[in-house]
Image (cartoon, rainbow, N blue to C red):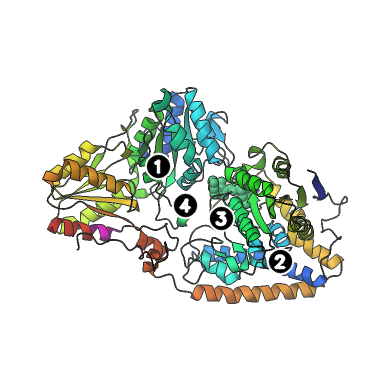
Amino acid sequence: MSTALKKERKPQRPPRGGLATMVEAIRAGIWEEMERDPAVFLIGEDVGTYGGAFKVTEGIIDHFGPERVIDTPIAEAAIVGAACGAALMGMRPVAEFQFIDFISCGFDLLTNYAAKCRYRWGANIPAVFRGPCGSGVRSGPFHSLNPESFFTNTAGLKIVEPSTAYDAKGLIKAAIRDPDPVLYFEHKKLYRLPRLREELPEDDYIVEIGKARTRREGRDLSIITFGAQVLTALDAAEELEKEGLDVEVIDLRTLAPLDKEAILGSVKKTSRALILHEASLTGGIGGEIAAIISAEAFEWLDAPVVRVASLDTPVPYSPPLEDYYLPQVKDVVDAARKLAAY
Amino acid sequence: MRISTKYAPRKPPEGKPRSCITDTSLTHEQMLELYRFLKLTRLVEERIVNLYRQTKVVGGVYRSLGQEATAVGSAYALRPDDFITPIIRDLGAVFVKGIRPREILAQYMAKAWGPSGGKDLNVHFGYLDKGFLGPISHLGDMIPVMTGILLGARMQKKDIVGLAYIGDGGASTGAFYEGMNFAAVQRLPLIVIAEYNHYAYSTPTSSQTAVRNLVERAAAFGIPGYIVDGNDVVACYEVTKQAIDYARKGRGAVLIEAKTYRRKGHAEHDDQRYVPAGEIEYWEKHNDPIDRFEKFLLDQKVATQEKLDEITAAVMREIEEDSEWAESSPMPEPEGAAYGVFDNSIVPPAFRPKVLES
Ligand SMILES: Cc1ncc(C[n+]2csc(CCOP(=O)(O)OP(=O)(O)O)c2C)c(N)n1
Ligand SMILES: [Mg+2]
């Protein structure tokens, strides 16, 4: 595009409520927190003028200025470390990974520094580390990651991943206000999905970290999932309904600490549990959830706990490969049928 | 360590258009080959954009428009068994290394016949026998890997050098520093081309580093540095040749900074709103590497315009043929996703386990 043709940009303060996609909801949540608390600031690659690779932070620099929206060099270790230091000083950094795949470059500081400060010497790190995760958009092995299980085995990091615009806003606000480090994963496929557009309340609200949400009530079996796979689960549930199966869908929303009460409550009601996630099966968070269920709801179960997840491979690029890699509605429906018939 | 500015960009005399340096050991035949690679790079990328507009490309399109000379000129100084590891803007170097347009086109279309069989994107593959080591997305990571290639080669008494490319942004990563430092202290024959193309995605180089020239970092590694006019393909060739000579003698690593300009956005979707008005047009009009080399070839009577047109026509024919080949490739079979994580004669393919069937 010719440089002469560029559009004028005005900082658009997001409306308090109204219809919002997930990306708009996250932006509104960040914006409101920055208005509420001068300690909140943004740090990351291309988050300023460009507004981030997915435009999550678009317009924020125009309103709040470059002191509070800091474009960094390509240096994730520096981003995480600097966020930790600023947080120790009482600031509230919201750090962005351009793609969540690059969180690996900040892994050391996240798992060794951010996660362990409070435990070691009582100093808390109120920082948010966010970024686009997830596959299904033909981005190949390095722009498709679902990294939650790299971190669930590290004590000291909270992990959230919304699947609705409402939750996205409520969770980003809760994460910013939280006294401890929070990893906030945003499935890139959901950012602008029209299906997720919803009316948001005008009032200030948060979604409490550590609380799951029942997205669909049912009696016959529970699908426990989160992120973009909530949509797969809901689609599967609709199909199963036609066959007379009444499926409950639990959206975890927080992956650490897990809402055991919600998981166990649902499973005790339905007696059948299917865990669905987009990361590879082996070592995924599904194993942890299955262990909790079998240890604490064994007597209520009428069937083994089953897991549906992606292949134990990197995320391949080509559409037929990626579709095969990912759990599809059909895989969930098949598994649910067998589970119900068990 | 001194920084050589012998090949640095120079302002042309008032009113004169830019050309290329004339002090060169390149033969006329070699120059025409360089010209072919420059045109091939630009025209293949244009073909990829066309395919993208026809929605035949899966994923993003990354251009090296305006910086083709850096990749082509530098890689041309290598011997066949030397190694390169490019970044996304170095398609030209990939072609110099003997990779064919059809392979790149098939990669962009995520086809089965692409070298990665649809598992990965664009230049993300490799041929060890050709000395081509494709990158991963994570910037900086290939510098230490190339260091290891050279370490291995030295242990095997192989006389090769490694040419690695890094962006002005990628040079901010920890991996870049660790790899450079390690190669330097081991005196490995690593030549790194740092491409100062003014932007890393939307971030100007002035927000990326406090040094004015990326090459100033050579001092931190204790290695020699060069600045080269990255839009002068002859200068890029000559400077890399000098660095290779130095490295091959066992004297160690070299950092070369190429001054160039990224005329397109980070990827095809980028509207370049962060670019000051007129900047792109300036580089297009006054500092296009292919225009400059054409002028050089004509002025130096290396070739006539007809000869250059002939080369371009041959390139077009090759691209036509290769596009057809790539388009005729099937998409990969879905089940292929499960293969190749490990040696499948030891560990079986990673099929999705059947639920409640035993
Ligand atoms: C470690 C890491 N962080 C972030 C990214 C996302 N990213 C991809 S390309 C890019 C900009 C690269 O700029 P530069 O290194 O100057 O290369 P250029 O695109 O200009 O050739 C960024 C930030 C990445 N690939 N790797
Ligand atoms: Mg750059």
Q: Which residues are magenta?
A: A327-333
C-alpha separation, residue under disc 4 versus residue under disc 1: 13 Å
| Crowd tier of the residue under label 2, counting other residues whose Cα lies within 10 Å: few below 14, some 14–19, many 20 or above | few
Q: Nearer the viewer, residue B47 or B191?
A: B191
Residue A335: image location, x then y, percent? 22, 58
Q: Chain of mark 2?
A: B
Question: Please, is residue A11 above or below residue B188 in the view?
Answer: above
Name the residue type under label 1. Phe
Question: What residue appears at the point 42 percent right and 40 percent down from the top-left corner?
Answer: A24
Res B265 visible: no
Q: Which residue is mark 4?
A: A143
Name the residue type under label 2. Arg
Q: Which mark is residue A185?
A: 1
User: Considering the image in quadrants, where does the N terminus of chain B appear?
Assistant: top right
C-alpha separation, residue under disc 2 versus residue under disc 3: 33 Å
Count of numbered tags = 4
C-alpha separation, residue under disc 2 versus residue under disc 1: 46 Å
Q: Chain of mark 3?
A: B
Disc nearest the viewer among 4 and 2: 2
Res B118 visible: yes
- Are discs 4 and 3 located on one and the same chain? no
Name the residue type under label 3. Glu
Disc nearest the viewer among 2 and 3: 2
Q: Which residue is mark 3?
A: B268
Question: Please, is residue A292 above or below residue B113 in the view?
Answer: above
Q: Which mark is residue B79?
A: 2
At mark 2, the secondary structure is: loop
Tell me whether circle 4 and circle 1 mark residues in contact (CB < 8 Å).
no
Tell me whether circle 4 and circle 2 mark residues in contact (CB < 8 Å).
no
Sequence-wise, which precedes: disc 4 or disc 1? 4
Tell me whether circle 4 and circle 3 mark residues in contact (CB < 8 Å).
no
